[in-house]
Amino acid sequence: MPAQNSTITSDLQKLEILNNQSLNNKIKNALNLINEEDSKKVMLEVLKFLFLIAKTDDILTPSIEVDKAWHEFILHTRIYDKFCQKNFGRFIHHTPGGDQKENIQRFKHTLALYTLNYGQPVQPWWPKIKLDTDLCGSCLAN
């Protein structure tokens, strides 16, 4: 991973939201994770996804696991709104939709942007798409 990409990831790891106990517990339960450390890891991936959204006008699609964790973040409405306003100057909306073919193309585009900005996508949070019938997140972000 290039130095710039690891600096970005390191900066994101310093964000207070990763230590929110309530959010980490909700993510842990929603994704059936074994420990809080995994909740923090997937939440870091949510943050990377949100920062990608803020950098582009493109419609992006998260992985299923990142999408589920993002849902939990959004349900903490005040925290989510404050985080978005502070870091992006706007609220990042979550819009379910798109057909499977569209979602797969957007997911592939999301993975390409992720790789460009952060290096190789972190497994298991960002699975590789092998076939055009593979599942990815079905939610759009803009």
Image (cartoon, helix red, strand yellow):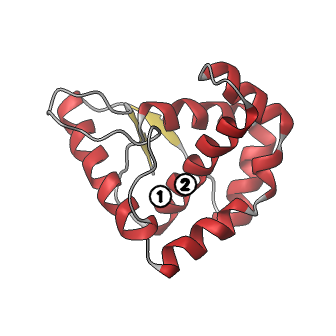
Disc ID at residue 53: 1
Q: In this view, does 12 lie above or below 19?
A: below
Give me the disc on residue 4: none
Which one is nearer the viewer's eye here, 6 or 18?
6
Q: Which residue is drawn at 77% across and 50% down?
A: 17
| 83 or 64, nearer to the observer | 64
Q: Are marks 1 and 2 in contact (CB under 8 Å)?
A: yes
* Residue count near mark 2 (Cα–Cα under 10 Å), binned few <14, some 14–19, many ≥20: many
The location of residue 79, given as percent across then percent down, is: 79, 45
Q: Where is residue 77 in the image (x, y as percent from the top left)?
A: 75, 37
Residue 115 showing in the rendered view: yes
Q: Mark 2 points at which residue?
A: 50
Q: Position of residue 27 (x, y in %)?
A: 67, 29
Amino acid type shown at disc 2: Leu
Q: Can the viewer see residue 89?
A: no
Element at label 2: helix
Left or right: 41 in relation to 139:
right
Name the residue type under label 1: Ile
Residue 140 vs residue 25: left or right? left
Of 52 and 134, the residue lying toward us: 134
